[in-house]
Structures are given as C-alpha cells and as structure tokens.
Amino acid sequence: MNKISVVPNKGQAIAGYIYLAVQLLVLQPALAIINLLLPVPMSNTTLNIVYFIINFLCVAAIFCRYLLSSGKCFFGNLLRCLCYAFLAFSAYWVASTFVSSLIFSIDPKFSNVNDENIQQMTQDNFTLMALGTVLLVPITEEVLYRGLIFGKIYNHSRILAYLISTVAFAALHIVGYIGMYEPKLLLLCLMQYLPAGLCLGWAYASTGSIWTSIVVHIAVNLIAMLSMR
C-alpha cells in the first residue's frame, strides 16, 4: 500500500483532534451566547462568517507547518497534482449527479437543508459568504477531514480512512439540523455529501498533498456559490 508521506505529525494531530472537538461541541454555542450579549447582535450571516474566520485561523495556526510541507509537495509536482485535481473534480460531478438522481427518485421534492441555509445567507451578503465558502472553508475542512482524519488513518487502513472521513465529512453538514428536520430528509442530505468525501480523499491520497483536495474543494464550492447568485 502506497503511504501518504506528508501527514500531520503527532503534536499537530493531538492539537487538531482537541480543536475538532471544540469546534463541534463548543464553538457554535459559545458564539451564539456571545452574540446574545452584544448590544447589537450580529445577523446569522455575519455570525457564520465569524465562525468561518475563527475556524480558519485556528486550523492555520495548528497546521501551519503541515500546510507548508504539503504546499512544497504540491508545487514540486504541480502538473501531476493539477491533473489529479481535474480527475477528482470530474469524478465528483459524475458521482454527485448519480447520487442526486437516486435521491430524487426516492423523494422528488427533496431539497438540501444546508444548501437552503447557505443560499439564504448568500443573498444577505454574497461577497463575504463567497470569501468564506470558497476560500476559508475548503482549507479548514480539508485539513481537518482529509489531512487529519483521512491522512492519519490511511497509512494503516485505506478502507477505514475512506469510510470514517467520508461519513464524518457528510455528517458535519447535517449535524446542526438534527431535531429540526425529519431523519429521512437528513439521511438524504447526508447521502448527497458522500461523493465529495470520497473524491476529495482520493485526490489527497493520489498526490500526497492536501492542497490537491483543497483545489478541488474550492472549485466545487465556487461553482455552487455562483449558482446561488
């Protein structure tokens, strides 16, 4: 089995897992409480942008050296990495189209609740949401879900790496809606994110650089954002 040579070291991994737990369990509730205490509370859109920025800064601080090392790998094999990025991007759209067709055959009226929420915030402030969604979110999510979770597991078990990182990445996009919508709808939403997790993991594993999957993620989010304008 070919191993991924550039992965977070032990110290980065420990700090990363601690931050991931804080992000999932503490950060959003804490921001919501702080927002309520402000003389003039921020809008939901502004609050999410602040969330994006905090996540990005924390991940960049923890994984700075990892990002630099992975960047050297990316630019040292630029043409190869870009080719794999294109293949991963193409595979994502084929797989995503198939999964979406399957979902609509199950529920013709299906609408992704996370996409609806993002679209509403995009209408409030397209520029800031585009900045967060197209630049900050891809770097943050790729480092945590591909670099940290996928990369650290992949060198021991490919199957577990794909399984755990893909499900965790998909769950990230629906966990905030649990209790607000029926389980069937949330399960269908989760299914819609599975192709992205698989293809982004493959992009990273094929080139050994997290920046390959970041490029793919940026391209996917850019197209999604432009379609919402």
Image (tube, helix red, strand yellow):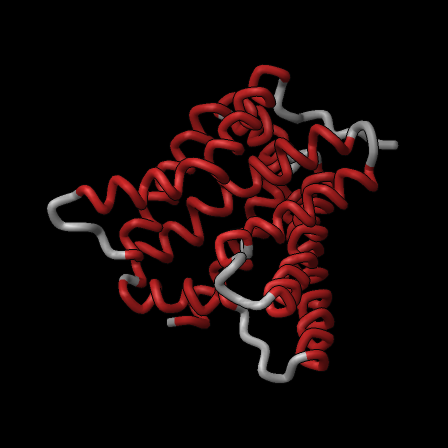
x then y, percent, for residue 164:
72, 42
Visible in this render: residue 83?
A: no
**Residue 199 percent across, percent down from the top left:** 70, 52
Image x and y of residue 185, in percent = 60, 69
Q: In the displayed structure, would residue 71 be above or below residue 33?
A: above
Seen at 77% across and 33% down, the residue is 154
Q: Residue at x 38, y 50 (%)?
A: 132
Q: Which quadrant holds the N terminus?
A: top right
Residue at the image position 75 percent from the left and 44 percent from the top: 162
167 or 224: nearer the viewer: 167
For residue 10, side relative to residue 16 (left or right): right
Q: How many marks?
A: 0
> Which quadrant of the figure has residue 204?
top right
- Toward the bottom, the furthest residue is 108
Residue sitting at x 42%, y 30%:
58
Quadrant in which the C terminus appears: bottom left
Q: Is residue 226 left or right of residue 47?
A: right
* Residue 180 visible in the shown view: yes
Q: Residue furthest right?
A: 1
Farthest residue to the left: give it: 39
